[in-house]
Amino acid sequence: MNLNQMKEIMDSEKLNHYLKAHQLENIFNGALMPYLSLYHVESGECVCSQGDRVNYLYVLVKGKVKVYTTSVEGKNLILSF
């Protein structure tokens, strides 16, 4: 996974808006606020790949994500949108 491709949005008002709009402020309370970041991911950009070590929790607040796996034959098998 390459975080350099994702663009961080340095806008605490927008972050708070998404937390309230999706009723996440009770889950990600004040103690966690310093650790929260808002990112923009371009269409087609990979957030993480099968087998990657995941160091972050991602929460989709706007848009769509395609989840797929790759078969042994190399074909992409879509699991969910």
Image (cartoon, rainbow, N blue to C red):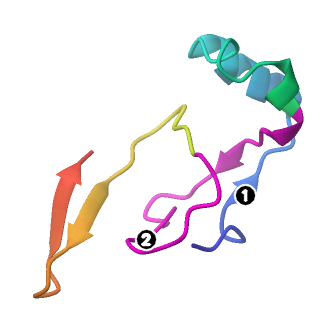
Q: Is residue 17 above or below residue 4?
A: above
Residue span colored magenta: 34-57
Marks 2 and 1, how far apart at CA:
18 Å
Name the spot of residue 3 as percent of width and height, x first: 68, 67
| Residue 43 picture location, percent across and down | 47, 58
Look at mark 1 in the image and give the residue it sits on: 7
Residue 62 is tagged as none
Q: Disc 2 marks which amino acid?
A: Ser
> Residue 6 appears at what percent x and percent y?
67, 61
Q: Is residue 14 above or below residue 43?
A: above
Q: Residue furthest bottom?
A: 73
Q: Residue at x 71, y 24 (%)?
A: 28
Q: Secondary structure at mark 1?
A: strand
* Residue found 30% across the figure and 55% down from its top: 67
Q: Earlier in the sequence, mark 2 or mark 1?
A: 1
Question: In this image, 77 relative to 68: left or right?
Answer: left
- Decide: marks 2, 1 in contact (CB < 8 A)? no
Residue located 10% across and 88% down the image? 73
Q: Secondary structure at mark 2?
A: loop
The residue depicted at 52 percent of the width and 33 percent of the height is 62
Quadrant of the drawing holding the C terminus: top left
Q: How many marks?
A: 2
Q: Nearer the viewer, residue 55 or 46?
A: 55
Q: Which quarter of the picture shows residue 41?
A: bottom right
Instruction: Estimate how packed mark 1 is, as few (under 14), some (14 to 19) or many (20 or more) residues with alpha carbons within 10 Å.
Output: few
**Type of secondary structure dominating the magenta stretch:** loop
Say above or below: 41 vs 60: below
* Residue type at the position of mark 1: Lys
Looking at the figure, which quarter contains the N terminus?
Answer: bottom right
Front disc: 2 or 1: 2
Instruction: Check the image and name the residue furthest to the left.
Output: 73
Q: Which mark is residue 49?
A: 2
